[in-house]
Amino acid sequence: MFGLDKRDTTLLLIVTVLTMFAPFILNPFPTDSGLAQFNAGYPDLMQRFVIFGIFAIGFNILFGLTGYLSFGHAAFLGVGSYSAVWMFKLLSMNVIPAILLSVIIAGLFALVIGYVSLRRSGIYFSILTLAFAQMSFSLAYSVLTPVTNGETGLQLALDDPRILGASATADGSIPVTSLFGLEMRSTYSMAVGPWDFQFNVGYYLCALVLIAAFYVAIRIFRSPFGMMLRAVKSNQQRMNYTGLNSKPYTLAAFVISGMYAGLAGGLMASMDPLAGAERMQWTASGEVVLMTILGGAGTLIGPVLGAGFIKYFENIFSKINDNVLHGWFSFLPDGIEDFLVFVIHPFIGKGWHLTLGILFMLVVIYLPGGLVEGGQRVVGWLSRRKSAQSRQSETNPAE
Amino acid sequence: MDAFLLQILNGLDKGSAYALIALGLTLIFGTLGVVNFAHGALFMIGAFCAVTLQKLLSLSFEMVDPEKTDFLGNPLKVKTPYVEAWFGPEVGGTIIEWSVPFAILFAIPIMVAVGFIMERGLIKHFYKRPHADQILVTFGLAIVLQEVIKYFYGANPIPTPAPDALNGVANLGAIIGMDIIYPVWRIVYFFFACVIIAAVFAFLQFTTFGMVVRAGMADRETVGLLGINIDRRFTIMFGVAAAVAGLAGVMYTPINSPNYHMGMDFLVLSFVVVVVGGMGSLPGAVIAGFVLGILESFASMEWAISLIPGINQIIIYLVAIIILLVRPRGLMGRKGVMED
C-alpha cells in the first residue's frame, strides 16, 4: 500500500490505529476509580505526545540515519513557533498558513546552520550546532526582542492586524486558532458509563500530521537517499574514496529534520498560540535526543515510542506525591510503608528528572538500541526458548 | 583607558573559571579520550562542597540566655554555633567567616573521590564506544548529579559570602595613578586560578608521574608495553581534573551564589573554550579560557553593543564558529588530533 512493503504498511497501520484511537487507549481507567490519575487521554497531553513524536521522528532522520548528533535541534522548533505566532498575528487565525510558514522558515534556518555545521563531523558537529542554538537562544532573549518579545514570549494581542481575519471577536476577545472555522480547542466529550472520552479537534489535526510525517519518514528510510545516509553513518571516508560527495546528502537530511522540528513548533503554536525563547534552550535539544535514544535511534517506530514514553511518565510521575504512595502501600505494615515511601520519594513529583536521567543512563549503557531493541531482545529470547523446547521434544532418528 | 583596563580585569575572573574547567576537560580528553559532558556538574559539586562546609560549621545549638531578655521580658534563646562554643567566639567566628577558603581543603578529597568513582564506575566502560555514546552517557550523568543536588539543597541559589577581609573593593589603579575600583575577591580568584594552573602544569612537567602521563597521552600503547600501569595513572588524572573543576567551583561561590544548574551554564561555554583552544592541548585551553573571558567582557562595553547589538551575548559562540571553520584543530591543537 502507498508504495510500502508489507512490514512497513503494518507499522504505518499500527501508528494510525494508535493515534486515531488514542482517546480510548490512553483512557483505560474509569474517572471515579483510584487509577484515574494514570489516564493520559486529555487533549493537552495527547497533543504533546504527537507533537514531540513528530519532532523526534525528524531528529531521527538526521541522527538515526547519518549518525550526526545535533545538540541544537530545539532552535528549529523555536523558530517554527515564532513564525507560526507571527502568522496568527499578521494574517489570520487559520493554522494552515502558520504551519506552512513555520516549516519553510525552519527549513531555511536549518539550511544556513547545516551548511556551516556540516563542514565538521563527530563531536565538532555537536558543538557547532550547540553553539548556534545557544546563539539563537541568547539573541531571542536580548536583541531580537522586537521579533520575539524577549522574556515574556510572543503572544497574540487585540490590536494585531490579522489582514484576512478579525483583530478581535465580536465580544472583544482574542480569536482562537482554527482550521477553516473549526476551532482547535473545541472538544467533544463522550461519556460511556464511568468513562469520559475526549475528542479534540487540535489533537486530531496533530495526529493526521503525525501519520503523514511518519509515512514520509518511512519513504525516506527505504529510499536510495536513505541508503546513502546510512552509508555515510557506517563509513563516510570510504564514501568519499569512491568519489562521492556526501555533503549534499547530509545537508538534505539536516534540512529535512529541521523542517520536521519547525512543523512540530508550528503545531505547538497552533494548539496554544504563544512562543517563548526557553523552547530553544539546549536542555530542550537534549530532551529530543533523550526521546530518540530511549525509543531507539535508527528505527522507525522508536522515536515515536520514546516521545510518548517520556511525555507520559513526565506527566504521571510529576503528579504522584507522598499521599498517593501511602495509599498504594497501605496494605504493608506501617514501618515498611514509611520506609518505601521514603525511598521512592526522591524519584517522584519534582524528582522526575532524576528518574529520567537514571533511565537514560541505563539505556545508553545496557541498551544502546533503546526500547525497540529491548522489545526485540525479549521476543528473541522467548522464541529461542520456544524453539529450544520444541527441539527437546523432537525425537532424533538414530543414526 | 580606565574602562579598558577595567574590562580586562572583568574578563579575567570569568576567564579564570573557563580556563580551570577547560583545563580539566582537556586533561580528561587528552588522557582518556573521553568527552565528558558531566564536567560542569563537577564544577557545581565543588561549589556545593563550600556550601556544605559553611552549613556544617554554622551548625548551632539553642540555649536560653538568662542575662538577655526580649522586649516582653522573657529570657531570650540564643543560637550558638558549636564551633564558637568549642574555640571561643573569637576563633570560632573567624573559622565560620573563612569557610569558603577552608572549603578548598574540604573539597579536594571529596572531588578526587567523586572523580575516581565516576571513572571506575562508569566512564571506564565507554573507552571503546563511539564519542556520541560518551557524550550521551555523561550528559545523563550530569542530569542525575544535578537533580541529586537539587533534591538536597533546593532549587534556589544559596548565598555563600567571602570572608569580610576579602569582601570589599580595592583601588587597583592607585599604583599607576588611575582609578580602578575592583572587588577584592575576584582578584583573589584570578590568582588562585593561576596557582592551580601552574601547579597542574608543574605536576605534569617536573614529576616522574607527570612525565609518564604525558608519555601516555602521546602513545598509550607503548607506555603500557613498557610495563607501566597507565590506566591507573589516567584514573588518577581524572581525579585531578575533577578536583580542578571542583576547586574552581568552591572559589566561585562568593562571586555567584551557587545553584543546581550553574554547572550546565558553564559547561557549554567551557566546551566552546576547549574547541577554540584545541582539543587535547592544555596550554590552548588555558589561553583560550582567558582570551574568551576578556573578549566577552570587551563585547559588553557600550561601544561594542551600539556597533553590533547583542554582540555581548554571542561573541564566544561566534569566535568558536569562526575558529572551527577556519582552523578546525583550534588555536594550539596538535595536527591530526580530532581534526575532522
Image (cartoon, grey):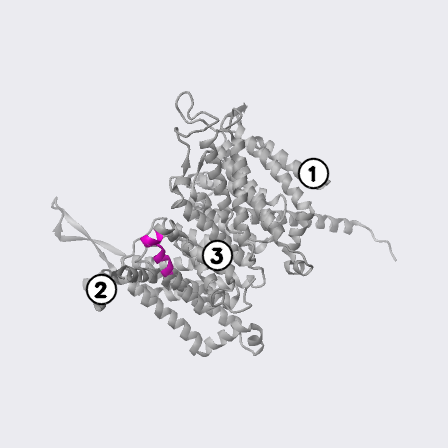
Q: What residue sits right under mark 1 in the picture? A: A9
* Segment colored magenta: B293-305
Q: Is residue A38 visible?
A: no
Do tag 3 and tag 2 residues touch (Cβ < 8 Å)?
no
Q: Is residue B65 visible?
A: yes
Name the residue furthest right. Answer: A399
The circle drawn on residue B178 is 2
The circle drawn on residue A60 is none
Tell me the amino acid under the disc marked 1: Thr
Q: In the picture, residue B59 is in which quadrant? A: bottom left
Chain letter of mark 2 equals B
Where is residue B246 drawn, in percent x and y? 39, 62
**Along the viewing direction, whichever of B295 and B188 lies nearer the viewer:** B295
Q: Residue at x 58, y 55 (%)?
A: A366
* Crowding near the residue tagged with mark 1, few <14, some 14–19, many ≥20 C-alpha atoms within 10 Å: some
Q: Secondary structure at mark 3?
A: helix
Where is residue A392 drawn, in percent x and y? 77, 51
| Residue B298 counted in the magenta span | yes
Tell me the amino acid under the disc marked 3: Ile
CA separation, marks 3 and 2?
A: 37 Å
